[in-house]
Image (spheres, coloured by chain):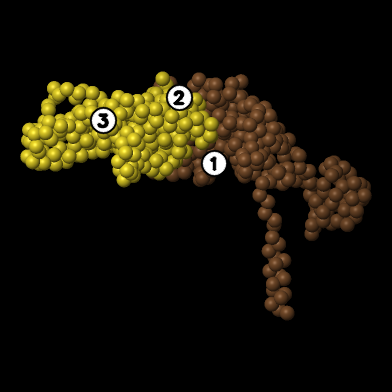
Chain colours: A brown, B yellow
Amino acid sequence: MIEVRGLTKRFRGRVAVEDLTLSVQPGTVTGFLGPNGSGKTTTARMILGLTQPDSGTATIGGRCYRDLPHPLREIGALINPGAVNPSRSALEHLRWLAAANRLPAARAETVLTKVGLEAVADRRVGAFSLGMRQRLGIAAALIGDPGVLLLDEPINGLDPEGIRWIRIFMQSLAAEGRTVLVSSHLMSEMALTASELIVIGRGRLVAAESVASFTARVDSSVRVRTPQLDALAAALTSGGATVWREDDRLDVVGMPIEQIGAVAAQVGAVLYELSPQQASLEEAFMHLTSAECEYVVEPTPVADTVAAELAELAA
Amino acid sequence: MSSLAMEWTKLRPLHKTSRTVATAIGLAVTVSAVVAAAMAAHGAHMSSTERSHFDSIGTSLQGVNAAVLAVAVFGVLCVTREYATGMITTTFLAQPSRLRVLAAKLGTHSAVACVAGAVASVAAYAVGQALLGTAGLSVGWGAHQLVGALAGGAIYLVLICVWGVGIGALTRSSSTGITWLASLLVVAPVIVQILPPGVVHAVGRWLPSQIGMRAIAGRPDPHSFGPWTGLAVLGGYVLLTVAAGAWRMVRTDP
């Protein structure tokens, strides 16, 4: 279990993480979500004792990382898959890690097999692809058979097969009762992998809840198709709903689906479709973090610009 | 102890380690052979006073001064390579006490430097004496002060290796660290040589290279520190640098 209390870090006066409090529970995959530059990696590094916080604490099973006598036995971390001496072999890399925490040298072979790298155990890490390095990083995280795992952007640079492998792997680790915190800026991936979410933006906590309740935060709309579009739209609007009209259908927000059905019956509208439209995790995320984004790019109305230029040419 | 095991396991499989040891020994033997051969050729023209003042031990051990750069770079790289590849974060994950990491690096690397230094000194001496013997300038293995000079050479190399580790921890950059050490060991004596004679003696004795020369010498020099005083002075430089490097390692996050 990971506990973070009032964690704050500034780099040259610029806030990276501010008064962050969160806890990560065992038995589930917890997604750590935030836009680029929102403080995910800084938070991970503070949990791991690599960056000294300005204030606040981060503990693993009640103890600070630096107070753990054999930290790799308590928490395994993947923080930078490139952080390996390229001239060493995969096996040699894992062996010094094992030696550092008084683990049997045979653990190196065990975890290499677990991540499917046993065939390249003696190959130089410098010749590894990014995907193989990610796997080696995960093997390193598992070397002490820890109860807590902290994986920072583990699917970066992986091919679809590798992503699928890592997803199933993380879920199986959580099913074994381990605490799994995985950071990512890819919402779609988190929707498939995680069941709990911690969302941060600009170093502050935005949400900490289940994926389902996070998604429910964004108003879900109801799609209605009927030949009596005008009559139904008017009745729904006067009933207090917000209605968008699209060609042959209505998108309704702010009224329960049952009530929409009742209103349709009252005005005698024939319904071809009445269906709830669930907001995706991505929409929920964009909705909640739009104010917290570090770098915002204004959407350029390309079509308008092109149209204006064409008009100018024609004139 | 587990940090020592960690650093030792890191060091062992690397070809660089054996290459450093081989380079240090090879350089020492080659330079000693060249210097001794030149002195032996010159020996025929030496007067009897020159012969009586000739430092046979120091001449045979000249190669130690060449081995010193290999050992210094070995020390610097043991820290800077980890910062360059980012592996230092993995090291700190395995051992969060940064002082223990530094101590383990110092322990393992000075052990390697000590073995390399001892072998290099003995091998260089053997080759140097064999060549000097052709001109009747050798003093053999029973010479007075020989043990002190051999030990001095090995200790000098260990201190320079430790200095390299300290400078590596302080600069975190291979190129900067090696430039520092090369300036101190190679460039500084060249600059001091062009100063007025009185200043040369006053300043020269504080130079690490001069201290190294005296550590391996078989005869005293009135303008320099004695071998052990000199090594103590060098130890002082090393201690200050390592302390500064340790401070930066602990205070500044990688």
Q: Residue at x 39, y 23 (%)?
A: B5
Question: Is residue A199 something one can see in this rendering?
Answer: no
Q: Residue at x 22, y 36 (%)?
A: B63
Give the residue pinned by disc 1: A155
- The residues bearing labels 1 and 2 have C-alpha atoms spaced at a distance of 33 Å
- The residue type indicated by label 3 comes to Pro
Q: Picture coordinates of residue A155 (x, y %)?
A: 54, 41
Front one among B41 and A110: B41
| Chain ID of residue with mark 3 | B
Mark number for residue B161? none
- The residue type indicated by label 2 comes to Arg
Is label 2 in a helix, a strand or a loop?
Answer: helix
- The residues bearing labels 3 and 1 have C-alpha atoms spaced at a distance of 68 Å
Is label 1 in a helix, a strand or a loop?
Answer: loop
Front one among B125 and A315: B125
B108 relative to A80, above or below: above
Q: Residues within 10 Å of mark 1 (few under 14, many from 20)?
A: many
| Chain ID of residue with mark 1 | A
